[in-house]
Image (cartoon, helix red, strand yellow):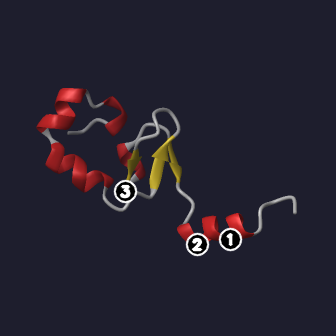
C-alpha cells in the first residue's frame, strides 16, 4: 500500500494486518492528525518524531520550570 496509515480504512486494516504490524513495530513517529504511530515517518501524513524513552524519563524526574 502506497498511502499513509492515516488514510487506511477499517477494512484495509483487517485485510492487511500483517503489513500493518510491520509498519508500526518499534514506533519512532506519531501522526499529529490522527495519533497513529509508525517506525518510519513516510507512513504518516503529519509525522512528528517521538521522544526517546530516556529523554522522557529525565523529563519526568526533572520537569521543566523547576
Asked whether, in this view, residue 27 is left or right of residue 63, the answer is left
Q: Which residue is the extreme one toward the right?
A: 66
Q: Looking at the picture, does residue 45 appear above or below residue 28?
A: above
Q: Which residue is the extreme one toward the left?
A: 15
Q: In the image, residue 39 lies at what x, y percent?
A: 37, 56
Callout in the foreground (1, 3): 1
Q: Quadrant of the C terminus?
A: bottom right
Density class for disc 3 (Cα within 10 Å; few <14, some 14-19, many ≥20) is some
Q: In the image, residue 26 lies at what x, y percent?
A: 36, 62
Asked whether, in this view, residue 48 is left or right of residue 66, the answer is left
Q: At 17% from the left edge and 44% from the top edge, which residue is drawn? A: 17
User: Which residue in the protein does label 1 denote?
Assistant: 58
Contact check, label 2 and label 3, Cβ < 8 Å:
no
Could you say which disc has been placed on residue 39 in the image? 3
Kindly state the secondary structure of the residue where label 2 is placed: helix
Q: At 54% from the left edge and 67% from the top edge, which residue is drawn? A: 53
Asked whether, in this view, residue 32 is left or right of residue 28, the answer is right
Contact check, label 1 and label 3, Cβ < 8 Å:
no
Q: CA distance from mark 2 to mark 1?
A: 6 Å
Could you say which disc has been placed on residue 54 in the image? 2
Contact check, label 2 and label 1, Cβ < 8 Å:
yes
Q: CA distance from mark 1 to mark 3?
A: 23 Å
Q: Earlier in the sequence, mark 1 or mark 3?
A: 3
Kindly state the secondary structure of the residue where label 3 is placed: loop
Q: Earlier in the sequence, mark 2 or mark 3?
A: 3
Q: In the image, residue 12 lies at what x, y percent?
A: 18, 32
Q: Looking at the picture, does residue 5 appear above or below residue 38?
A: above
Q: At 81% from the left edge and 60% from the top edge, which residue is drawn? A: 64
Q: CA distance from mark 2 to mark 3?
A: 18 Å
Q: At 62% from the left edge and 64% from the top edge, which residue is drawn? A: 56
Amino acid at each position: 500500500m502506497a498511502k499513509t496509515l492515516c488514510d487506511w480504512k477499517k477494512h484495509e486494516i483487517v485485510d492487511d494486518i500483517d503489513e500493518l504490524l510491520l509498519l508500526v513495530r518499534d514506533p519512532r513517529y506519531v501522526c499529529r492528525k490522527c495519533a497513529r504511530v509508525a517506525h518510519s515517518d513516510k507512513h504518516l501524513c503529519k509525522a512528528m518524531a517521538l521522544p526517546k524513552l530516556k529523554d522522557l524519563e529525565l523529563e519526568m524526574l526533572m520537569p521543566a520550570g523547576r
